Image (cartoon, helix red, strand yellow):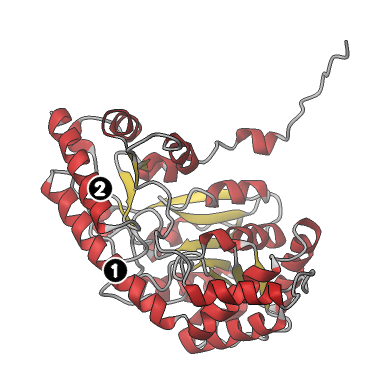
Amino acid sequence: MTIVKRALTNERVTKIPASGIRRFFDMVSGVEGSISLGVGEPDFVTPERFRQAAIRSIDEGHTHYTSNYGIKPLREAIAEHTARLRGLRYDPATEILVTVGVSEAVDLALRATLNDGDEVIVADPSYVAYVPGIVLAGGVPVPVATDEASDFRLLPEDVERAVTPRTRAILLGFPNNPTGAVLEARDVEGIAGIAREHDLLVYSDEIYDRLVYGTEHRSIAAEPGMKERSVYLAGFSKSYAMTGWRVGYACAPAAVIEQMMKIHQYTVMCVPTSGQYAALEALRSGEPEVGRMVAEYDARRRVMWSRFNAMGLHCFEPRGAFYCFPSVSSTGLDDEEFAARLFKEEKVVVVPGSAFGERGKGHIRACYATSMERIHEACDRIERFVNRNTR
């Protein structure tokens, strides 16, 4: 019998916990009568025009590898879209890379620009993949606390205090998952000033940029002098109801895109061809669909937010994305116990706030990208659970 003496796994990977979102997502599988408010996924089916574009591309024989950068018409459409939406002009030949969702874009950006020991400032709480992604790229995450007193925004003064000689970059994920926070103009301007002053790179994950309510999203890449030091990351999953298609993109200086492309080239080659054609159609004709879905999310947002507050789970009003982030401290339960028992007793899945960072403790994330009927039913069940457990 052969005895393996060396560790079989990479130390960095071993130290990273599995996603707290997926753990609760897996719970619901096969459980009859359950309602999931856990995974951040639109309940809308991808609009028919997008689906038909993908089918047509297959019928026309577009079934081969594409350029590593993505098909040229899609990159050109992304350039036009970004210029129209953000006032940013990128060269589709050298400054745009089509990726397997924004998740790959974030990973590529980190790996292409970080050296071992580089520090990256990131909001706490924030999306579960950010801290592991920084670690896997050899960087050191530096969480900066946000809280409800400042609407869960990442404040420039807090960012400034976190800067050290080892700071390489700032990672922004706003509108924020899990809190629903949106940065104000003064926040964006202040953080941009810090990046310029300290010669920092900014990764800006703007996957929820279209999902804002009663406010406006501003991209830091559009601030003076920031296009040259920003990696702008966006995609189709959330705003266009295309999660399963896995199409995102990165816009950045050509030198950065080239390095990202090399990693992309050696790992996934290119984004599935039919998905790229669906994304192209989304940019060409999808604005009415985006408007329709955002209006529906807004109505659902107001219902869930008011229901949480009415049942005694104090909830900050989310202004972006499609999540509520109520506190569960009134129940005397921590967020892990609350989520686990809620599923066991009422078959409703939410995600513990601690999955998103230290500052998420004592909260849960509930996604309102589901039907109004299911939101009401889920809130009825949560209210029953809260009434039984509030101390």
Q: Which residue is mark 2?
A: 326
Q: In which quadrant of the rendered view does residue 290 lie? A: bottom left
Q: Which mark is residue 296?
A: 1
Amino acid type, label 2: Pro
In this orientation, which residue lies closer to the viewer: 151 or 177? 177
In this orientation, which residue lies closer to the viewer: 173 or 168? 173
Q: Which mark is residue 160?
A: none
Q: Position of residue 307 (x, y in %)?
A: 16, 51
Judge left or right: residue 49 versus residue 389: right
Q: Position of residue 370 (x, y in %)?
A: 33, 56
Mark 1 vs mark 2, foreground winner is 1
Helix, strand or loop at label 1? It is: helix
Q: Position of residue 388 (x, y in %)?
A: 14, 29
Marks 1 and 2, how far apart at CA: 21 Å
Picture residue at 28% right of the left edge, 33% below the top: 342
Picture residue at 64% right of the left edge, 62% below the top: 100
Whether 14 is drawn above or below 236: the answer is above
Amino acid type, label 1: Glu
Picture residue at 35% right of the left edge, 67% below the top: 182
Classify mark 2: residues with Cα within 10 Å, few (<14), some (14-19) or many (20+). many
Whether 103 is drawn above or below 27: the answer is below
Circle nearer the N terminus (1, 2): 1
